[in-house]
Image: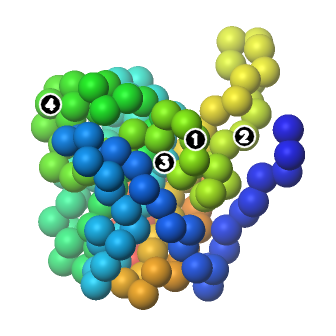
Amino acid sequence: MSERIQLKAGDAAPAFSAPGLDGEPVTLESFAGRGLVLYFYPKDNTAGCTLEAQGFRDHLADFEALGYAVAGVSRDSVKSHCGFRDRQNLNFPLLADKEEVVCTAYGVMKEKMMYGRLCRGIERSTFVISPEGRILHALYGVKAKTHVEELLALLKA
């Protein structure tokens, strides 16, 4: 496996295009003029990913008050995302990156152990992007349980 990129504060946010919940492309430009919290998670309907999504859902107004939209990205299909959104009453877009294009551009794909086997998957990560398209914070390897509250504290500081 080739070495993955690691974005850092000050970098230009990689442009992206991935299907949203309606199947239409969602791009970085879709969020022009406002900040974006772009978070990557391993899989719909799993315990940690559900907990994290619920945190973003419950605190969306707090992020919006700070000038940020929220969007989640995983390798799941649009159909899976729609079911996840409906079951969890999510109020922000989810992007389907089945081909790992967005995940690779943001450096979140990594090899990890799962059930004693080495596999390739998404490292839970979040990027805070300025309205001008610059990375303000690149947070790799975040914890689902505490991440949303820690991120809000960081943005309010």
Amino acid beneath label 3: Phe
Q: Is residue 13 above or below residue 21?
A: below
Label 1 near label 4: C-beta < 8 Å? no
Measure how far apart labels 1 and 3 are at the Cα level: 11 Å
Q: Earlier in the sequence, mark 2 or mark 3?
A: 3
User: Disc 4 designates what residue?
Assistant: 86
For this rendering, which residue is in front, 146 or 43?
A: 43
Label 2 secondary element: strand
Percent from the top left, x then y, of residue 50?
Answer: 34, 33
Measure how far apart labels 2 and 1 are at the Cα level: 11 Å
Residue drawn where x is 16% and y is 49% of the image? 91
User: Disc 2 designates what residue?
Assistant: 110
Label 1 secondary element: loop
| Other-residue count near label 1 (Cα within 10 Å), few / some / many at <14 / 14–19 / ≥20 | some
Measure how far apart labels 4 and 1 are at the Cα level: 24 Å
Label 4 secondary element: helix
| Other-residue count near label 3 (Cα within 10 Å), few / some / many at <14 / 14–19 / ≥20 | many
Q: Can I make out residue 47 in this image?
A: no
Q: Earlier in the sequence, mark 2 or mark 4?
A: 4
Amino acid beneath label 1: Glu
How many labels, in total? Answer: 4
Residue drawn where x is 31% and y is 25% of the image? 80
Measure how far apart labels 2 and 4 are at the Cα level: 29 Å
For this rendering, which residue is in front, 129 or 48?
A: 129
Residue drawn where x is 76% and y is 33% of the image? 111
Kindly identify which numbered label has been placed on residue 100. 1
Q: Earlier in the sequence, mark 1 or mark 3?
A: 3
Amino acid beneath label 4: Asp
Kindly identify which numbered label has been placed on residue 40. 3
| Other-residue count near label 2 (Cα within 10 Å), few / some / many at <14 / 14–19 / ≥20 | some
Measure how far apart labels 4 and 3 are at the Cα level: 19 Å
